[in-house]
Amino acid sequence: MELTINETRVHVEAPPDSILLWVLRDELGLSGTKYGCGEGQCGACTVLLDGQPARSCQTPLRAVANRHITTIEGLAKDGRLHPLQEAFVKEDAMQCGYCTAGMIMAGVGLLKNTPQPSEQQIVSAMQGNVCRCGTYPRIVAAVRVAAKGGAA
């Protein structure tokens, strides 16, 4: 199957019912996308499908053919972090870091669709991503900072 991942066309040898998360991690070595609950509830496995956040642990390969997949590894451009990644560092929005990739991907998806979100829109968009360390206020602050800097 041919996939477009992080703007690169790749061929994968996997059955169409294979789960995207495992193909990304095990077949392609893109380990930034994390396995959390395996039920699509925690958000650790969030990637962007055509710019929209999606749970890769619940997404079969057959559902991503002819779609653009973006993982956390695909956000940095020309050696520079994405503005939301920079904001996460600036706002110290991560502790253990396990949820960080999924949080950033959900935030990037929000900023693509709503470049200047309200606080309530940020909270709502991030609602499906769990941070066991409880850094939610700093995560919201990071999304707010990235929005002010024009992240998209």
Image (tube, rainbow, N blue to C red):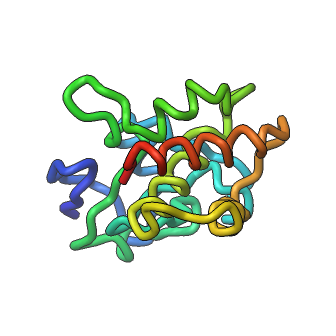
Q: Is residue 22 left or right of residue 140?
A: left
Q: Is residue 54 visible?
A: yes
Counting every numbered tag in the picture gives: 0
Of 44 and 103, which appears nearest the observer? 103
Q: Quadrant of the C terminus?
A: bottom left
Residue at image point 27% right, 52% down? 5
Residue at image point 62% right, 65% down? 118
Position of residue 52 relative to residue 89, above or below, is below
User: In x, y percent, where is residue 54?
Assistant: 51, 66
Of 96 and 9, which appears nearest the observer? 96
Residue at image point 30% right, 26% down? 80
Position of residue 152 relative to residue 127, above or below, is above
Q: Quadrant of the N terminus?
A: bottom left
> Residue 139's image quarter?
top right
Position of residue 35 relative to residue 95, above or below, is below
User: In x, y percent, where is residue 68?
Assistant: 27, 63
